[in-house]
Image: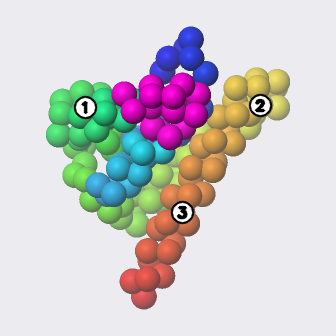
Amino acid sequence: MSPDLNFGDCCLVHDYEYWRGGTKQERLEADQNLRSCVNTERRGLGDIYYTATRLFGSSRLPKPFHWGFGWSDRRTVSPLSSDELDDIRKHTLDYLEEQRLKCEDGDEEACVNQSLVGQAYLRLIRVHSSAHAADQ
């Protein structure tokens, strides 16, 4: 993250999406959303972030932050399984509860984090629910 600039919220959502991983299309959308969000704060800077994440965010490169870094094994770029979605749900709900408690204690950043990650999680559920319904 870039502490001197005001787009940490953009990075938080992008980091959450990279943590969970998924398909090539989901990665592309996560990177495009980051570009759009950062460009809202600093025109042109989002384009630089987009290029960097496209070049260096691949799960094939040996680094700690890559697409799907939340999994202990090197997960391929592929649709999330039902078991993986269950794991994501559990870890996300634990995180949201932790942020809720901090928010109640007056931590404003935790309040924002809870909202942003909650919204990103709901988008994930909607996408996967629609895909599941289309498969039926």
Q: Element under label 3?
A: helix
**Of residues 107 and 32, the one drawn nearer to the viewer in this rendering:** 32
Q: Residue at x 42, y 88 (%)?
A: 136
Query: How far apart are the two marked residues, 1 and 2, measured between alpha carbons?
Result: 34 Å
Q: Which mark is residue 36?
A: none
Q: How many residues crowd around disc 1 within 10 Å: few (fewer than 14), some, or many (20 or more)?
A: some
Q: Is 89 drawn above or below residue 58 in the view shown?
A: below
Question: Residue 90: x and y, percent?
Answer: 54, 51
- Residue at point 32%, 62% (across, down): 79
Q: Secondary structure at mark 1?
A: helix
Q: 95 left or right of 131?
A: right
Give the mark nearer the N terminus: 1 vs 2: 1
Quarter of the rendering containing residue 60? top left
Under mark 1, the amino acid is: Phe
Mark 1 = which residue? Answer: 56
Give the residue number, with chain letter if any, for mark 2. Answer: 103
Residue located 25% across and 53% down the image: 77
What residue occupies the far bottom of the structure in this picture? 136
Farthest residue toward the top? 4
Mark 3 and mark 1 lie on one chain; the one further toward the N terminus is 1
| Residue picked out by circle 3 | 125
- Residue 5 lies within the magenta run: no
Magenta range: 34-48
